[in-house]
Image (cartoon, rainbow, N blue to C red):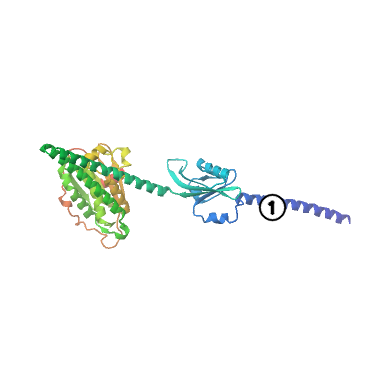
Amino acid sequence: MLIGVIGGIIGLVLGVFGMISFNLSERQRREAVEVQEPNLPDGAAEVLSVVGRAFVVVDGTDGVVRASPGAFAFGLVRGHTVVHQELLQLTARVRRDGVIAEAALELPRGPLGQGTIVLQVRVALLGEEYILLLADDRTEITRTEAVRNDFVANVSHELKTPVGAISLLAEALEASAEDEDAVRRFARRTHTEAARLAALVQDIIELSRLQGTDVVQQGQAVDLNTVIAEAVDRARLAAESKNISFVVGGHADRAVYGDPHLLVTAFRNLIDNAVRYSPENTRIGIGTNSADGLINIAVTDQGEGISAEDQDRVFERFYRADAARSRHTGGTGLGLSIVKHIVANHGGEVTLWSQPGRGSTFTVRLPEMEGGPGAEVPEAEVPGAASLEPAEPKSGNNFTTGDARVQKNQGATA
């Protein structure tokens, strides 16, 4: 009997300890679940999982209890902390007023560098103790709108200058009808401004045309040797007026896939640019080679060169390193932008190497066309190249054309 009583006491003690242990483990499990899975309103978790935008859920002390991968990718959250003070200000306002808040914010992309991200943020109460932040990335849309607005503003400004000049010159002509010398002088200036206006309008048309051309759908096999020969021929008259000669070397062994008219425009702009900024009695080299599935075409001049601070911006629309000189030479500031767009649409790139006093080299790299009819280019089909005789330069760079020169410039532009 004594043994039975002792056994009952031991069983009771073990039972009590078991219940205590069970209650402790159940409480710990419940607390762990509450930390990892906050008690969000019914259905909120399911809605957030398919919302399609970056989101962050914070508690009453602005601690992050749930965040989407997009929120981490945008740099809004680090660990369990909301990074940006602007977002915390919005959550404080919503917590205080109980009203949904919206704002467009430009925030740093990360802790380093100057990159930013533009977000449309909407903040609202989620249940009684949480606040939800929804973020929609508007960076690309904002950038596109800014480019469009800048383009319209720049076009308006650039058109206004020659139009205003022509108007003033017309008034001067009318007032000087009896003075033959003045009439001739004003007429020459009117002709210059009219030519500048025509060039600007043509460049704007080219930009619009290339933006509306689908190279993938409308492309064909293009022999770059023929394209370069035609571009050189179109620039010959302007070059001869400054006694500038062309030296063409190398050969593209395979065709590229694209639009031949756009490619002629791109290389014509590069060569025209070289002619415009080259001194008299110099020469321009155009070298071609093929390597690693790419065709490399380098256009080298013996001009004054481009400063390091201007090199990153020369491909921007309407940007001119020397605005006064560009007005004198008739440049519109769109030529290199057109080149960049055309080459990019053909899956290639254009790079620049330049040093003040040593001239400039623009190198275009385009992917060769793989297989298919017309991919191979015969060596003999290089129209116009034989007539391009090299001339001794008066000053500036001493260079050769062909593979060696292009390879040299590839290293310089890397």
Q: Which residue is mark 1?
A: 26
Residue 292: image location, x then y, percent: 31, 53
User: In percent of the image, x 25 and y 48: which residue is there?
Assistant: 201
Residue closest to the eye, 382 or 230: 230
Query: Which residue type carries mark 1?
Result: Glu
User: In percent of the image, x 49 and y 52: which residue is there?
Assistant: 53
Q: Quadrant of the N terminus?
A: bottom right
- Can residue 265 be seen in this snapshot? yes
Residue closest to the eye, 176 or 4: 176
**Figure label count:** 1
Residue closest to the eye, 6 or 403: 6
The reply, left or right, for residue 117 in relation to residue 273 is right
Q: Residues within 10 Å of mark 1 (few under 14, many from 20)?
A: few
Residue closest to the eye, 19 or 132: 132
Q: Quadrant of the C terminus?
A: top left
Residue 118: image location, x then y, percent: 44, 46
User: In percent of the image, x 28 and y 49: which residue is there?
Assistant: 338
Quadrant in the rendering for residue 284: top left
The reply, left or right, for residue 100 in relation to residue 315 is right
- Label 1: element kind: helix
Residue 72: image location, x then y, percent: 50, 48
- Can residue 402 be seen in this snapshot? no
Quadrant in the rendering for residue 45: bottom right
Please identify the residue farthest to the right as the structure is shown: 1
Residue 225: image location, x then y, percent: 22, 54
Q: Above or below — where is 402 with respect to 112? A: below
